[in-house]
Image: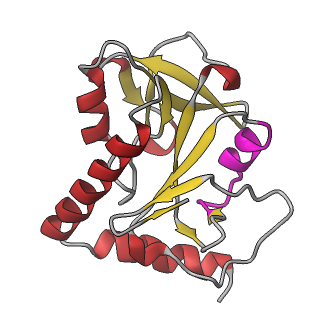
Amino acid sequence: MDNKAIRQSMIQKRLDLTPSQRQQKNEALAAAVFHYINPYQTIGLYCSYNGEVDTYGLMESWFWDTDRILAVPSIVNDALIFHPVRGFDDLREGVKGILASTQSAVLSKGDLDVILVPLVAFNEQKYRIGYGKGYYDRYLSDYPGIKVGLAYDFQCTNALELHSQDIAMDVIITDADVLL
């Protein structure tokens, strides 16, 4: 199976989750994320889209923590740029209908202690595939912080076709495990 077929299969499996299955998996994931991310102050994270692991519940909790800085990506000139957000009012629909920050301020890669990265699929060596455009691989190629992938446990496969530009995560958190 090639990456395109894996991508289609995994996205469909995510979309096929029932609301109760999704809620149960997201709650398990959130507990692990809160535990793992606790020491970090500046967090880059994606806005969930297309059945991805929910990040809105994480945001809702972290927005109350005034010591933390949250940042979400937008796509500008075919590159990811992270902008701070203080609440849901700072989000608006962006490229492909994915929510992005309304703020013009930009956080540099060095400003972000940790980035939560969406995974379409991953392998046991902590490599991932996304939607195939390479935005995260390009951004993470010289990112100095901690890279944390978020996925459901069924998204693990050892059939990924790896390429030279693929970036391994430091940690992958699923609803069933934390791969360190």
Segment tinted magenta in the rendering: 129-142
Colouring mode (rainbow / by chain / secondary structure / one colour): secondary structure
Q: Is residue 5 magenta?
A: no
The answer to whether residue 71 of the structure is visible from this angle is no
Which quadrant would the N terminus be assigned to in this image? bottom right
Question: Which residue is more in the foreground, 179 or 165?
Answer: 179
**On screen, 36 above or below 72?**
below
> Could you tell me which quadrant the C terminus lies in?
bottom right
Q: Is residue 32 left or right of residue 81?
A: left
Q: Residue, x 35% and y 16% (percent of image)?
A: 86
Residue nearer the viewer, 145 or 133: 145
x then y, percent, for residue 53 = 36, 55
- The vertical placement of 104 against 48, above or below, is above
Numbered marks: total:
0
Q: Position of residue 66 (x, y in %)?
A: 31, 12
Identify the residue at the far left of this view.
Answer: 20
Q: Farthest residue to the right: give it.
A: 164
User: Which of the 4 image quarters holds residue 3?
Assistant: bottom right
**Relative height, residue 99 to residue 152 (above, below):** above
Please provide percent x and percent y for residue 176.
34, 69
Position of residue 85 relative to residue 19, above or below, is above
The residue sitting at 61% across, 17% down in the picture is 107
State which quadrant residue 77 falls in: top right
* Residue 58 shows in the view: yes
In the visual, does 13 lie left or right of 106?
left
Q: Is residue 169 left or right of residue 119?
A: right
Between 154 and 126, the one nearer to me in the picture: 126
Residue 70 locus on image (x, y percent): 43, 24
- Residue under the point 36% across and 18% down: 90
Q: Is residue 175 left or right of residue 6?
A: left
Q: Please tell me whether residue 139 belongs to the stretch shown in magenta.
A: yes
Residue name at image x 34 percent, y 52 percent: 32
